[in-house]
């Protein structure tokens, strides 16, 4: 045991010195002793002359225009650079860097890091720069990289500062600058109060999107479940706990994963089918309880213990509401919008976690502002007692069923998804007919609502039988529809390189769409944007590729790292020369008219 311990310690010292012992060395050590390892290492070192890092990897920065830089690494023969260890940022507040466009490297099986993408010979990366139009700009670039020698020497990470002189020019009023790039520039160099105010306003807008609206019935159900004891003040306090739980979790998780270069993984992790199914079943249980099927309560011993704890510290219930807000943020907010991507870009590229996290926190508060209004009005809008309280409670049960259907819809076949939506609609129809009525007028209104809901439920069931997949249009349309775009699937970097090369051979541009089944905005793009005739006309000559990252497997993650993408929907354009038009990347949902114009410009850009 002592001998093995000594061997592990000495091997650790060798690794710290960046001189790697091979598997053969270790095997030989197991047969003899530690001195064998040193002898083999000394023998190798004396027979092999390793280059200094500045000679093994020569790097320079060259201005290609007022808003683009070319980074070139000349890599000595027998040496290679890791793609995952490359990084570039700038301390300047006069410009914001975009994501560097990197070519596809070679697959390399590393003894310690596993399968890696590496570069041999020469690496050329093109770096977009966002800056105000004006005079020439001296821009410092802090470049980080790490490489190894095939013979067994691994260098520590190298950080160099390169000065590049950009000519006069920069962004012009008529030029295209993506929304995420504009926001990233604002976070990096704008006044902090302006940043916080802007992102709060963007959060308010996001609160009206399908990603955030489902939080309203969740919070309303939590408040309504407390019955007539909820005052306006307590409703607001519960809502604030919920919103703060959402904001803190959203901010901390996004900042941590962005700083680690894993922006999408946290999102994809909480979209795993078993996690989504578990939460959907939780909402079904809550719905059945609110509908009176059974009484959902803790065992009496647990209730007694909690009551005793609550008498000493009243924060326990608020803590559980905050925890629900945190979980709702991770599960419900499944699409990525440009404000989020902009903050992640700043965190990942500049390392400025504070400004990026502050922007995300402000955006989260904006997203939760309507929820605060829901809580503050609970004391006035929710009945305190009487038969109507039962009706309100059942209404929230229907909303919980709708939440479960919304979550499961991304996992099941299209026809079954239509039937899932029919369940809460039929429940609403039954509730409208069986609710307590105080007058003939109220009875007429409720019966009319129930009849309409029943008709819609029948339409959903008929649509499922006919093969329809859109719950908002369950019956077939007669005219005015356009066939969906036909995409070629790419499942790996090798697939992408092959398809782009084939397009270059035909002198055709390329559009690459990143898609996931759990991405709400992806489906909005499919339904409202890609189906539009103007968009289809703009993309008529382009090769259409799609990377489905639903599973988030190793190939999906390699594609995302290659592009520096945080989540779908993200769309990249390539020219007929096979080079990506980085400035024209689209993140998040975009309306058809705007997307058609952008597509024409991107595919025509040189």
Image: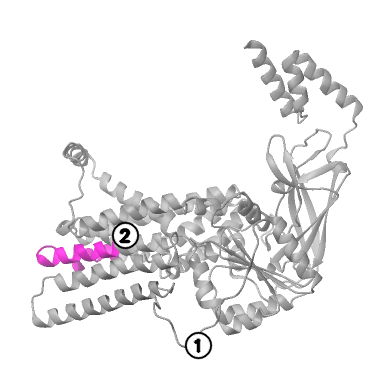
Most common SS among magenta residues? helix
Q: Is residue 259 left or right of residue 123?
A: left
Q: Return the x and y of residue 545 as percentages of the image width and height.
A: 65, 67
- Tell me what residue is drawn at x 20 percent, y 47 percent: 297
320 in the magenta segment? no
Q: Residue at x 66, y 78 (%)?
A: 539
Residue 173 horizontal/vertical position (percent): 67, 79
Q: Secondary structure at mark 1?
A: loop
Q: Quadrant of the N terminus?
A: top right
Q: Look at the image and tell me whether residue 66 can be seen.
A: no
Q: Is residue 33 placed above or below 408 in the rendered structure?
A: above
Distance from Cα at disc 1 to Cα at disc 2: 37 Å
- Magenta-tinted stretch: 374-400
* Residue 503 visible (yes or no): yes
Residue 480's tag is: 1
Closer to us: mark 1 or mark 2?
1
Q: Quadrant of residue 138?
A: bottom right
Residue 227 versus residue 476: which sits nearer the camera?
Answer: 476
Name the colouring of the figure: one colour
- Looking at the image, which residue sits at the far front? 465
* Residue where numbered disc 2 is placed: 218
Q: Position of residue 272 (x, y in %)?
A: 47, 51
Quadrant (top left/top right/bottom left/bottom right) for the C terminus: bottom right
Dot 1 and dot 2 residues touching (CB under 8 Å) = no
| Circle 2 SS class | helix
Query: Above or below — where is 206 with respect to 312?
Result: below
Q: Is the residue marked by circle 2 packed among few (<14), some (14-19), or many (20+) residues within 10 Å?
A: many
> Which mark sits nearer the N-terminus, 1 or 2?
2
Disc marking residue 18: none
């Amino acid at each position: 045991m002592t001998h093995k311990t000594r061997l592990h310690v000495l091997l650790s010292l060798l690794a710290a010195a960046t001189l790697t012992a091979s598997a053969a060395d270790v095997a030989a050590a197991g047969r003899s002793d530690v001195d064998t390892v040193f002898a083999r290492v000394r023998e190798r070192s004396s027979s092999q002359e390793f280059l200094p890092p500045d000679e093994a990897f020569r790097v320079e920065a060259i201005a290609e225009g007022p808003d683009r830089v070319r980074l070139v690494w000349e890599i000595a023969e027998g040496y290679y650079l890791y793609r995952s260890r490359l990084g570039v940022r700038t301390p300047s507040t006069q410009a914001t860097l975009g994501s560097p466009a990197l070519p596809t490297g070679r697959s390399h099986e590393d003894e310690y890091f596993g399968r890696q993408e590496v570069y041999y010979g020469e690496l050329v990366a093109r770096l977009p720069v966002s800056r105000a139009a004006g005079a020439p700009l001296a821009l410092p670039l802090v470049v980080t990289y790490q490489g190894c020698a095939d013979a067994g020497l691994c260098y520590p990470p190298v950080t160099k500062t390169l000065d590049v002189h950009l000519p006069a020019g920069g962004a012009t009023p008529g030029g295209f600058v993506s929304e995420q790039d504009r926001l990233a520039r604002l976070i990096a160099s704008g006044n902090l109060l302006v940043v916080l105010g802007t992102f709060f306003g963007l959060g308010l807008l996001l609160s009206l999107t399908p990603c955030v609206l489902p939080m309203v019935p969740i919070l309303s159900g939590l408040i309504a479940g407390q019955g007539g004891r909820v005052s306006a003040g307590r409703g607001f306090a519960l809502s604030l706990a919920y919103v703060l739980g959402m904001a803190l979790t959203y901010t901390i998780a996004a900042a941590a994963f962005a700083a680690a270069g894993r922006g999408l993984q946290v999102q994809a992790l909480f979209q795993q089918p078993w996690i989504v199914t578990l939460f959907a079943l939780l909402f079904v249980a809550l719905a059945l309880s609110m509908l009176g099927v059974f009484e959902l309560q803790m065992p009496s011993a647990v209730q007694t213990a909690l009551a005793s704890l609550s008498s000493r510290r009243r924060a326990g219930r608020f803590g559980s509401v905050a925890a629900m807000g945190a979980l709702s943020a991770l599960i419900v907010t499944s699409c990525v919008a440009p404000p989020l991507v902009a903050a992640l870009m700043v965190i990942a590229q500049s390392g400025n976690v504070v400004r990026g996290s502050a922007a995300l926190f402000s955006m989260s508060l904006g997203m939760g502002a309507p929820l605060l209004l829901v809580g503050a009005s609970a004391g006035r809008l929710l009945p305190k007692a009487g038969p109507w309280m039962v009706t309100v409670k059942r209404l929230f049960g229907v909303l919980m069923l709708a939440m479960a259907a919304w979550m499961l819809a991304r996992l099941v076949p299209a026809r079954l998804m239509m039937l899932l939506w029919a369940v809460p609609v039929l429940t609403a129809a039954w509730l409208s007919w069986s609710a307590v009525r105080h007058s003939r007028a109220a009875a007429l209104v409720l019966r009319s609502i129930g009849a309409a809901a029943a008709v819609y439920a029948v339409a959903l069931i008929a649509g499922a039988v006919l093969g329809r997949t859109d719950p908002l249009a369950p019956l077939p349309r007669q005219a005015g529809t356009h066939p969906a775009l036909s995409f070629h699937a790419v499942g790996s970097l090798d697939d992408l390189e092959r398809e782009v090369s084939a397009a270059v051979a035909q002198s055709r541009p390329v559009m690459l769409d990143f898609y996931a089944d759990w991405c709400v905005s992806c489906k909005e793009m499919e339904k409202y944007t890609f189906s539009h005739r103007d968009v289809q006309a703009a993309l008529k000559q382009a090769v259409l590729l799609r990377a489905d990252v639903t599973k988030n497997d190793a190939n999906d993650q390699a594609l995302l790292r290659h592009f520096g993408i945080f989540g779908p929907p993200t769309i990249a354009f390539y020219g007929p020369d096979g080079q990506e038009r980085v400035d024209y990347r689209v993140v998040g949902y975009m309306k058809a008219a705007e997307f058609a114009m952008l597509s024409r410009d991107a595919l025509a850009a040189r």
